[in-house]
Amino acid sequence: MHIYKHEIRYYECDRMGITHHSNYVRIMEEARIDYLDKLGWGFDKIEADGVVSPVVSIECKYKSPTTFKDIVEVEVCISGMSELKFEFNYIMRKDGKLVAEGHSVHCFTENGRPVVIAKRLPELYERIVKDKKG
């Protein structure tokens, strides 16, 4: 599990002054990118190897609103994995209070075809396995 912090920006809020729901998906992406960067396998490195990681599915359940300048702490972790895809869970809190929960699934492709990440990028796969074990 990794913690990522995001400060809500003014433009992320709607006319009611609360964070627009679509921004939580962006925050989840920021947290996921930060997680992989901290593992030493950011998207820039993965993509430099010719592999991309599209979103297969994503969901977010909203529990409590946030507003401009709030700090959202995101716990992100790998919740499931196979040789073809990874699943991430996200718990988002403000001042310890749950504001949203999310889940995303990602596959790996090269030239539009699925790749077995354990074979194509074994170092990345091993680092995630090691991190998942804790």
Image: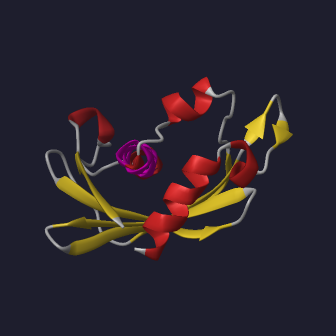
Residue drawn at x 59%, y 24% as measured from the top left: 48
User: Does residue 31 show up magenta in the picture?
Assistant: yes
**Is residue 111 visible from the viewing direction of this image?**
yes
**Is residue 61 visible from the viewing direction of this image?**
no
112 in relation to 120, above or below: above
User: Does residue 24 show up magenta in the picture?
Assistant: no
Quarter placement of the N terminus: bottom left
Residue drawn at x 78%, y 51% as measured from the top left: 116
Q: Quadrant of residue 115?
A: top right
Observer-nearest of 71 and 34:
34
Q: Residue 39: x and y, percent?
A: 41, 49
Q: Residue 127: x and y, percent?
A: 50, 56
Tell me if 86 is positioned left or right of 10 in this view. right
Observer-nearest of 10 and 104:
104
Residue drawn at x 76%, y 39% as measured from the top left: 109
Secondary structure mostly seen in magenta is helix
Q: Residue 121: x and y, percent?
A: 65, 44
65 in relation to 70, above or below: below
Observer-nearest of 122 and 69:
122
Q: Quadrant of residue 66?
A: bottom left
The span picked out in magenta is 28-38
